[in-house]
């Protein structure tokens, strides 16, 4: 007998995609048939984990990356990475929302046709925006909040993408600036929603909570105390959402002793080759081993130090499990993997939810933050040494890890989805 | 002369590997008596080098010597299949291996002088020259001037791996289809056993390093069976290059199993001499192996994928 078919639709980011792989593995284990709706460029990623994929249409040639548009993309984005969250609103956040709205409009018809064709019993949407075809598909849809808990507003929760505390005096000004920055994209999106028979959303919001089920990737250790608790029948918090991944064997390095430090800024952060180059130079002076994810940019690096190994891809959960410290950009998936394995984080955020998660790491004593620019080698070395040699931190992280492993967030997510189907 | 000693040692290592092949081909069980005379006949060499090779195998734990005399197999073919041949690679742990590893990890530049290598590895000239000789014999470096050597392209980046697959997609099916394809039937059984044993491992227990060894062994077997000498030579050299320099191979367990299943299906077709079918299966297998992760993704942008390659 075949189990219910569940379509998972992650956004075009590795964090979201691999988070959904964790849920899909558990859905499959619990008897469902998970399939993926994937963006062009991601085809094959899910098939390698054994899942059927349905690709969304390829955009027109003009909208796709060529070497020229790629260079323009890198140049345009790099200069924003060192700016404050407020300064990024106009230069990075607003154009990104415009692009996200474009991507929704572009795939709507094809997505509607695809959903009709495959006929899922439920759709799992791990994204920051609603695709009307999902809401109109006539089956329960599940929202996965995998960026940061700040996606769901509350007076006690910091404003989304702000990197500031909930009670920061600058909060009203940031919120006003955010609404102003995204206003054009938001109005355009609401017009599109109306055309698709969906009600418009309040200012600043691009995705409503699901009336069926919402899964928040926010482990207990970093969760916020909300002024208005979320209803438990529709909101389920996940203590991590870790996929099962290939076994990783640490390579032998010419200088092969000391703690193991893993650095990954995600695929977008990998474009900042000058920063990663500087960090590698600093690593050469430190008594530790470093694995550095440089994405598709291996060619940019020469004279790699003897205690450093570069890679274009690492099976991250398996690497983090063996690491003593994880340097990342504050992507929620990375942060949660660090917590799950009891590994302290050094967060060097550059955009989006990285700011929120970086602050949360400081607030909860699960890591430290360092600005991407303006640090000295000594400052970086001191921060790493402190994080690697703090017994209290290590003990705290071990406690968090134990609790998260017992909870198994991916299995909780799969159970919640299937329970909703049983009741539906 | 140190160089002579090195060459002799390498020959003994090669012979040790050949003895392991004989063990695998004949399916010797653990504890089997490996007589010098039988091995001498099987390998076509005298008993003196066989004795040296057995000594190496003993040092690496593959065989043990009993007081009553003679060498006995100290492992199983399945274990050998799963764990590979650590200690029996003539580059492993050697200066040649360290140089190659450092190049693959981008620690040293693609053009090197003997003097620079002597300083980096604190090694005498003769050792560096010996290492260069090994790498040169595998086509990994070529001489530029009397003192400088240049590394040939290796599989150290996603782009290089993409080009490697492109080459293999063009040649491997043709290796099967070219007139004169003939397999050494004695090797099929050990290959199958290796892959089947690996497939029985639980998820998380499959090593990418061992998989790479097995994968290269399978594709080398197909290459060496080809009737076209040029296709054969090119592919064998390329598989050696893959084995020594392809390091970025974090493949999910599902794909590892699927890939081994495809190997076994191809072997089935080859054994039935359904060569066109085997060639088609090889194409499908290589296409499936060509998953290229997006270079960079960001919300709202359309990442280029394999379909966008020119």
Image (cartoon, helix red, strand yellow):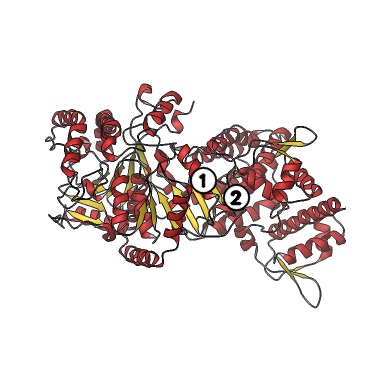
Quick check: A175 left or right of B33? left
Mark 1 belongs to chain? A
Taking depth in this image into account, of B20 and A231 the one nearest to the observer is A231
Q: How many marks?
A: 2
Disc 1 designates what residue? Answer: A280
Quick check: B114 left or right of A68? right
Mark 2 belongs to chain? A
Up/down of A173 relative to B83, above or below: above
Residue A349 picture location, percent across and down: 35, 45
Q: Quadrant of residue B37?
A: bottom right
Disc 2 designates what residue? Answer: A306
Taking depth in this image into account, of B112 and A369 the one nearest to the observer is A369
Neighbour tally class for label 1: few under 14, some 14-19, many 20 plus, Cα within 10 Å: many
Residue B36 picture location, percent across and down: 82, 64
Neighbour tally class for label 2: few under 14, some 14-19, many 20 plus, Cα within 10 Å: some
- Residue B292: in sight, yes or no? no
Q: Quadrant of the N terminus of chain A?
A: bottom left
On the same chain, marks 2 and 1? The answer is yes
**Helix, strand or loop status at disc 2:** loop
The residue sitting at the bottom extreme is B68
**Helix, strand or loop status at disc 1:** helix
- Residue B229: in sight, yes or no? yes
* Dot 2 and dot 1 residues touching (CB under 8 Å): no
Q: Quadrant of residue B163?
A: top right
Task: Find residue A141 and name its label.
Answer: none
Residue B83 picture location, percent across and down: 61, 59
Quick check: A90 left or right of B310? left
For marks 2 and 1, give the CA distance.
Answer: 11 Å
> Which badge, 2 or 1, is on the more N-terminal residue?
1
The residue sitting at the top extreme is A62
């Amino acid at each position: 007998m075949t189990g219910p078919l569940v379509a998972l639709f992650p956004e075009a980011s590795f964090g979201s995609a691999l988070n959904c792989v964790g849920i899909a593995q558990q859905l499959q284990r619990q008897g469902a048939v998970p399939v993926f709706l994937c963006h062009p460029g991601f085809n094959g990623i899910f098939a390698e984990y054994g899942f059927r994929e349905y690709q969304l249409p390829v955009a027109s040639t003009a909208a796709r990356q060529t070497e020229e548009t790629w260079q323009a993309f890198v140049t345009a984005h790099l200069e924003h990475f060192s700016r404050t969250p407020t300064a990024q609103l106009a230069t990075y956040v607003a154009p990104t929302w415009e692009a996200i709205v474009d991507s929704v409009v572009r795939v709507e018809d094809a997505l509607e046709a695809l959903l009709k064709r495959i006929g899922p019993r439920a759709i799992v949407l791990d994204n920051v925006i609603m695709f009307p075809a999902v809401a109109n598909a006539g089956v329960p849809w599940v929202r996965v909040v995998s960026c940061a808990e700040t996606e769901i507003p509350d007076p006690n929760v910091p404003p989304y993408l702000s990197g500031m505390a909930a009670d920061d005096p600058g909060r009203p000004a940031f919120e006003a600036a955010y609404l102003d920055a995204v206003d054009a994209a938001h109005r355009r999106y609401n017009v599109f929603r109306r055309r698709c028979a969906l009600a418009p959303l309040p200012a600043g919001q691009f995705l409503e909570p699901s009336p069926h089920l919402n899964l928040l990737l926010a482990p207990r250790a970093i969760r916020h105390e909300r002024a208005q608790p979320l209803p438990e029948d529709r909101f389920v918090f996940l203590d991590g959402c870790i996929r099962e991944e290939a076994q990783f064997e640490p390579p032998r390095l010419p200088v092969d002793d000391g703690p193991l430090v893993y650095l990954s800024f995600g695929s977008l952060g990998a474009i900042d080759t000058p920063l990663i180059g500087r960090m590698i130079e600093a690593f050469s002076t430190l008594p530790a081993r470093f694995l550095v994810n440089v994405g598709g940019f291996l060619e940019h690096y020469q004279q790699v130090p003897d205690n450093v190994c570069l890679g274009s891809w690492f099976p991250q959960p398996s690497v983090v499990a063996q690491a003593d410290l994880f340097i990342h950009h504050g992507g929620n998936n990375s942060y949660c993997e660090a917590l799950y394995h009891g590994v302290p984080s050094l967060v060097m955020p550059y955009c989006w939810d990285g700011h929120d998660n970086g602050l949360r790491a400081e607030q909860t004593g699960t890591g430290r933050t360092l600005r991407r620019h303006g640090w000295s080698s000594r400052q970086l070395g001191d921060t790493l040494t402190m994080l690697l040699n703090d017994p209290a931190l290590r003990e705290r992280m071990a406690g968090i890890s134990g609790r998260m492993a017992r909870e198994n967030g991916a299995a909780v997510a799969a159970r919640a989805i299937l329970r909703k189907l049983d009741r539906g | 002369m140190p160089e002579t000693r090195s060459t002799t040692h390498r020959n003994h290592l090669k012979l040790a590997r050949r003895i392991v092949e004989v063990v695998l081909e004949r399916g010797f069980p653990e504890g089997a008596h490996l007589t010098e005379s039988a091995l001498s006949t099987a390998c076509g060499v005298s008993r003196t080098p066989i004795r040296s090779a057995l000594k190496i195998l003993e040092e690496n734990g593959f065989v043990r010597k009993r007081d009553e005399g003679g060498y006995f197999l100290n492992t199983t073919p399945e274990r050998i299949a799963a764990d590979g041949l650590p200690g029996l690679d003539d580059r492993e742990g050697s200066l040649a291996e360290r140089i190659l590893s450092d190049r693959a990890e981008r620690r040293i530049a693609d053009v090197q002088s003997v003097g620079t290598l002597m300083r980096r590895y604190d090694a005498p000239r003769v050792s560096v020259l010996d290492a260069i000789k090994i790498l040169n014999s595998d086509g990994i470096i070529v001489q530029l001037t009397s003192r400088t050597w240049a590394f040939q392209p290796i599989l150290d980046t996603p782009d290089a791996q993409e080009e490697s697959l492109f080459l293999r997609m063009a040649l491997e099916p043709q290796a099967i289809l070219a007139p004169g394809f003939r397999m050494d039937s004695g090797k099929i059984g050990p290959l199958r056993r290796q892959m089947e044993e690996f497939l029985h491992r639980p998820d998380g227990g499959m090593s990418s390093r061992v998989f790479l060894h097995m994968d290269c062994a399978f594709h080398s077997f197909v290459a060496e069976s080809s009737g076209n000498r040029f296709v054969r030579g090119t592919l064998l050299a390329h598989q050696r290059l893959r084995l020594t320099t392809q390091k970025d191979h974090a493949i999910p367990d599902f794909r590892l199993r699927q890939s081994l299943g495809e190997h076994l299906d191809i072997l089935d077709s080859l054994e039935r001499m359904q060569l066109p079918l085997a060639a088609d299966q090889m194409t499908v297998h290589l296409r499936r192996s060509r998953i290229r992760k997006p270079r960079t993704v960001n919300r709202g942008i359309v990442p280029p994928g394999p379909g966008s390659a020119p």
